[in-house]
Image (cartoon, rainbow, N blue to C red):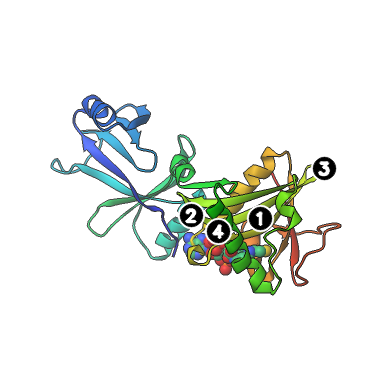
Amino acid sequence: MPRTLGLRHIALRVNKLDECIKFYTDVLGMALELQTEGYAYLTFGQDNISLHQNGLINFPSQQRLEHFGFACATPEEVDKWHQHCKELNVEILSEPETFGIGTRGFSILDPSGNEVEFTYHPPIVDLCFSLCAPRTHTDWQTYHYIRKDSIFDQINVEYDPNHPSLNDKNNYHYGFYLQNQMIGTLQLENLGGKKCSIRTIAIEKSQRNKGFGTLLLKMAEEKARQIGAYIIHLHGNPKAKTFYSDNGYEEMEFPNDVSIYSETIDYGKHLK
Ligand SMILES: CC(C)(COP(=O)(O)OP(=O)(O)OC[C@H]1O[C@@H](n2cnc3c(N)ncnc32)[C@H](O)[C@@H]1OP(=O)(O)O)[C@@H](O)C(=O)NCCC(=O)NCCS
């Protein structure tokens, strides 16, 4: 079953839209992200509400709740939910659609007619997840632990926390954080000539199969673009074959680079 980041969205039906906007911004301190005719989208960053002017939507007069929504980590996760709901013959109220600042969502009805939405909203993901250099000594310990436990121990290769690549200026070492907790690792190596390599990508055991590895890979691709690379090479563990192919990686020669593990498959991707 696909996963969500939690219940992060409530939509309310209001009869005093302007006063309500003022209330949620001035009294509660929310930011007004979007306002259109009869509609406003307000956010606390990770949580948001939308206000729908009474009368614009045809539903029972006593009802104040318009719908509620679950946040998804990627637009693809929204589509997975859509597929999942279709397979289970759930009533789909609106098909997946991308709008505004890249928000993507669709809605279903529960058996009582409540509207349930699944939404990817970029600021929620930006605030929940980050990919950055380990910040503290403890972060570095976690970084080494995840790499050792998830990658090196699995292939019986001794892990060296003082390996020269850790201080090499062409290598970027990133922790993948969910809020303040590091749950994954990634090493990006600038190979020059607009090429780079993704190495030691790992998600900590308890956090796998939630779509987080996919998100980490997307964020790594953004970092690759930032250093001017448009081809990514990697040595992939055969166990992660579908993970890479699902994310658009194809078998591709990785010239002049020998993997520490003889069973790896070489993959590559041209970034758009
Ligand atoms: C490879 C790795 C980074 C993937 O991370 P992940 O967070 O599990 O990745 P995702 O959840 O995005 O996708 C992985 C799998 O979960 C499935 N999946 C994706 N989203 C999902 C979701 N929301 N719910 C359930 N399953 C999901 C994918 O289909 C994929 O399955 P498949 O590979 O069997 O097809 C992780 O498994 C890992 O750290 N492995 C050990 C280290 C390693 O081998 N690294 C690669 C070195 S080459």
Let me know if residue 83 appears in the view. Answer: yes
Q: Could you tell me which residue is drawn at 74 percent across and 44 percent down?
A: 169
Q: Amino acid at mark 1?
A: Gly
Q: Looking at the rendering, in which quadrant would you find the C terminus?
A: top right
Which of disc 3 and disc 1 is earlier in sequence? 3
Compare residues 211 and 108 and report the one nearer the observer.
211
Q: Amino acid at mark 2?
A: Glu
Q: Amino acid at mark 4?
A: Thr
Q: Which residue is mark 2?
A: 77
Tell me the quadrant of ligand 1: bottom right
Compare residues 177 and 43 and report the one nearer the observer.
177
Q: Which residue is mark 3?
A: 193
- Of badges 4 and 1, nearer the viewer stands 4
Q: Which residue is mark 4?
A: 142
Q: Looking at the rendering, in which quadrant would you find the N terminus?
A: bottom left
Q: CA distance from mark 1 to mark 3?
A: 22 Å
Q: Look at the numbered discs 1 and 3 and tell me whether their residues touch, using CB distance below 8 Å.
A: no
Numbered tag placed on residue 248 in the rendering: 1
- Of badges 1 and 3, nearer the viewer stands 3
